[in-house]
Image: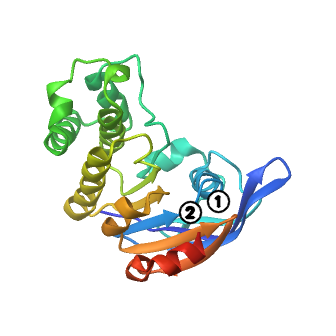
Amino acid sequence: MSLSLQAHGLRAGYGRKAVVHGVDFLAREGRVLLMLGHNGAGKTTLVKSMFGLLTPMAGEVRLGGQNITARSPAQNVRDGYAFIPQGHGIFRSLSVADNLSLGGFTEQDADQLAARQQMVFKLFPILEERAAQIGGTLSGGQQQMLAIGMALMHGPKLMVLDEPSIGLAPNLVEKVMRSIREINQTLGTTILIVEQNVKASLPVADDVIVLKTGSKVYDGPPQPLQDPVLLMSLF
């Protein structure tokens, strides 16, 4: 099952300073939407305001057609909306197994939790091998896999990943991107990837938007962005 995520005229920022200026976009059900932009383009501010970590200054956020503007992150999680922030978002002092258990805190069915954990281990076998290891001692790539695994433990219908490639070696970036696409194709989960790494993320995208200084400058298929001239003009 999947959910769409939509922004209408979203304006967001910090204090009185707007960083995002009236952005519209739609992450369509069951598809992978890639949000590209340079550092400081407003990508993180936008997705935080859509998840309820920031209160939008103006505009509207819709999840599966329902208005969720400024709703609490906890309610969004209960409705199947997962957000994986930059820096992996794990509990660094807890074991891999304990992190996964906490990821499934909204699910009361023990059999369902066990099935989801096995799904995570199938997707990321290294996590099963290191189930007893403290999360903070994992490599950067393994921590990113654990963060994704934690989100999968509550059965999300929509996943937003903020810069999943940050700090990772190129071979690990490729593996993480393949895993994201596999989640989409296997589970039908709607996915929004926020990235600067065009080369690694473009091949897994169905749709792309590009932000520049807080405004949307491209909204369409990924293929035209393989043209370096167009890409440079957008960045």
Q: Residue at x 43, y 80 (%)?
A: 227
Residue at which label 1 appears: 41
Vertical comparison of 221 with 153: above or below = below
Q: What residue type is labelled 2?
A: Gly
Please identify the quarter of the rendering in which residue 210 is found. Answer: bottom right
Residue 160, image x, y percentages = 45, 54
Viewed as shown, does residue 99 lie left or right of 128? Answer: right
Q: Are marks 2 and 1 in contact (CB under 8 Å)?
A: yes
Question: From what the image shows, is residue 200 above or below residue 24?
Answer: above
Q: 219 and 201: which one is in front?
A: 201
Residue carrying label 2: 37
**Percent x, y of residue 169:** 33, 42
Q: Determine the secondary structure under disc 2.
A: loop
- Residue located at (47% from left, 50% from top): 163
Q: What amino acid type is highlighted by mark number 1?
A: Ala
Residue 90 is marked as: none
Residue 235, image x and y in percent?
A: 59, 69
All told, the count of numbered labels is: 2
